[in-house]
């Protein structure tokens, strides 16, 4: 009995440390808006990089023709082709092909990697259509490259560093598009790279293409990031920035957000310390799919060390990242009366068997606390963006108008990623928090719209928009 009490205390303490009452969420909202300002004011002014994307014109819907995209984000890359027929074409993805990148190419030379990609792209192009379609005279390619890049224009950018297991030293500091374009030429492929973007910007473009009221995009998958449309004159660190629309999409790199208002626990601090990038990506480590399962594992390990309710301490509990987030979600969503799914995962993944029902319930509770905190913080981040652009219903401090006579415009945020689309409880908690923070009247005008394959299709759409403006 005493041991049970100890375990319950571990849970209670954890739950309290993860607390996200609406007051605290509002502090996170304010901190996000403040950091956005700081990141726009000067280079290095905030943990938020607030990167320029040079995307100032979004697709209008009138674009026509075939456009290609290449989506390079990590283990896989995809090539795709879309056909646009104007009037915001509803069927976009004509052809998609996914290929994994042979591991040895990730640490080879840039020529090897890009030759491999170029030849895959060439094969894709050569089998295009069924012969009945006329090939475009000039093939244009939008590229989504999800590594840290310092953009120098919409179609050029320098690789700052590799992540996700890539290590091709000769590429760092070089222009990604130049390297790719050279490989296309070497492989005899007549194709022009006209756009280089980050995946959130692709999602934003697709969202905006389908719904022009879209003001921002958020990705919550393995990692998390967001971008939004900012006024050019608010980008203070880039004085005299000229854009055709008066605005520019800003890539926030919000995974690196930090605030003292974030409800961080000792488990988060340990996870961070033991990670390959300590002190980096603190917000991401509390929110995204790469990490949530591991926070749960750490809490279960503590409980197991405090008492014998899980039997002898399983060595599996000490293995980082053994409990993947989709498994955590499966336990969380287990609606069988005996929690048989929880029992199965504990046994098969963590090698903990014969756990009594009340202990299994405790495990579900841990999942709930971790997912709920993550979803509510993501919601606060979204409202932070809305506040920065004056779409949170507060009407702006300067306007002097009261909340009720401010006409709130319809405001859409495109959202993508495995956590939002596949983790039901996460999605529900996120919506709930959005309503709590904004209040029903305002929340009514804010719509989260799930997009699919935005990172790839969006790059093709931007290539199209770019082409029609030239
Ligand atoms: P990525 O971010 O890797 O490009 P996705 O946006 O599809 O790709 O996100 C995949 C991530 O989403 C996985 O790493 C996993 O953490 C998470 N995920 C996928 N399916 C589920 C699920 N059913 N429940 C919870 N998380 C999931």
Image (spheres, rainbow, N blue to C red):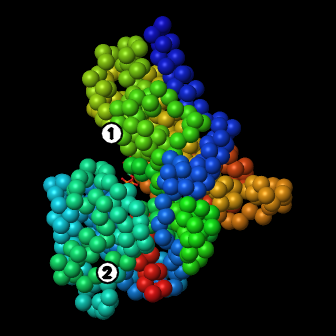
Q: Which mark is residue 192?
A: 2
What kind of element bears circle 2? strand
Residue 64 relative to residue 136: left or right:
right
Badge 1 or badge 2: first in the primary sequence: 2
The residue sitting at 45% across, 81% down in the picture is 466
Report whether the residue tagged 2 is closer than 8 Å to ligand 1: no
Front residue of 146 and 314: 146
What kind of element bears circle 1? loop
Using the image, determine if residue 106 lies above or below residue 203.
above
Front residue of 281 and 243: 243
Residue 415 image offset from top left, x and y in percent? 51, 58
Is the C terminus in the top left, top right, bottom left or bottom right quadrant?
bottom left
Asked if one can make out residue 68 in the rendered structure from this viewpoint, the answer is no
The residue sitting at 41% across, 78% down in the picture is 463
Tell me where residue 188 sits by quadrant: bottom left
Residue 25 relative to residue 467: left or right:
right
Tell me where residue 301 sits by quadrant: top left
Q: Which mark is residue 15?
A: none
The residue sitting at 45% across, 32% down in the picture is 268
Using the image, determine if residue 296 lies above or below residue 40.
above
Q: Which residue is mark 1?
A: 276
Residue 329 relative to residue 444: left or right:
left
Residue 372 image offset from top left, x and y in percent? 54, 39
The furthest residue to the top: 2
User: Is label 1 in contact with label 2 (beta carbons under 8 Å)?
Assistant: no
Using the image, determine if residue 248 lies above or below residue 42.
below
Using the image, determine if residue 312 lies above or below residue 27.
above
Residue 425 image offset from top left, x and y in percent? 51, 44
Asked if one can make out residue 219 in the rendered structure from this viewpoint, the answer is yes
Q: CA distance from mark 1 to mark 2?
A: 37 Å
Residue 432 image offset from top left, x and y in percent? 62, 46
């Amino acid at each position: 009995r005493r041991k049970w009490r100890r375990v319950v205390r571990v849970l209670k303490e954890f739950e309290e440390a993860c607390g996200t009452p609406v007051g605290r969420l509002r502090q996170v909202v304010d901190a996000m808006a403040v950091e956005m300002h700081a990141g726009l004011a000067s280079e290095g002014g905030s943990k938020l990089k607030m990167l320029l994307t040079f995307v100032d014109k979004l697709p209008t819907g009138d674009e026509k023709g075939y456009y290609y995209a290449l989506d390079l984000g990590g283990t896989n890359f995809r090539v795709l082709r879309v056909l646009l027929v104007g009037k915001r074409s509803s069927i976009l993805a004509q052809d998609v092909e996914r290929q994994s990148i042979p591991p040895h190419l990730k640490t080879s030379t840039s020529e090897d990697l890009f030759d491999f990609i170029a030849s895959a792209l060439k094969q894709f192009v050569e089998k295009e259509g069924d012969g009945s379609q006329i090939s475009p005279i000039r093939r244009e390619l939008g590229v989504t490259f999800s590594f840290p890049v310092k953009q120098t224009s919409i179609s050029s950018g320098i690789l700052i560093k590799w992540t996700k297991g890539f290590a091709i030293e000769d590429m760092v500091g070089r222009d990604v598009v130049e390297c790719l374009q050279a490989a296309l030429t070497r492989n005899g492929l007549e194709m022009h790279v006209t756009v280089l973007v980050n995946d959130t910007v692709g999602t934003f473009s697709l969202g905006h293409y389908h719904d022009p009221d879209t003001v921002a995009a958020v990705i919550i998958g393995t990692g998390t990031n967001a971008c939004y449309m900012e006024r050019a004159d608010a980008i203070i660190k880039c004085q005299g920035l000229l854009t055709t629309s008066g605005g520019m999409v800003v890539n926030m790199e919000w995974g690196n957000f930090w605030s003292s208002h974030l409800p961080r626990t000792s488990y988060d601090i340990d996870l961070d310390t033991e990670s390959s990038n300590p002190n980096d990506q603190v917000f991401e480590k509390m929110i995204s799919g790469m990490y949530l399962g591991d926070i749960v594992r750490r809490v279960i390990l503590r409980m197991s060390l405090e008492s014998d309710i899980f039997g002898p301490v399983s060595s599996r509990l000490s293995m980082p990242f053994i409990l993947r987030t989709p498994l955590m979600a499966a336990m969380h969503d287990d609606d069988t009366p005996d929690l048989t799914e929880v029992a199965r995962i504990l046994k098969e993944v963590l090698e903990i068997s014969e756990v009594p029902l009340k202990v299994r319930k405790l495990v579900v509770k841990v999942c709930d606390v971790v997912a709920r905190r993550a979803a509510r913080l993501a919601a606060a981040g979204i409202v932070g963006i809305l506040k920065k652009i004056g779409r949170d219903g507060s009407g702006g401090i300067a306007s002097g108008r009261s909340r009720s006579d401010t006409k709130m415009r319809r405001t859409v945020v495109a959202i993508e990623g495995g956590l939002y689309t596949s983790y039901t409880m996460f999605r529900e908690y996120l919506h709930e928090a959005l309503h709590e923070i904004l209040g029903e009247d305002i929340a009514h005008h804010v719509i989260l719209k799930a997009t699919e394959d935005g990172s790839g299709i969006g790059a093709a759409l931007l290539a199209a928009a770019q082409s029609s403006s030239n």
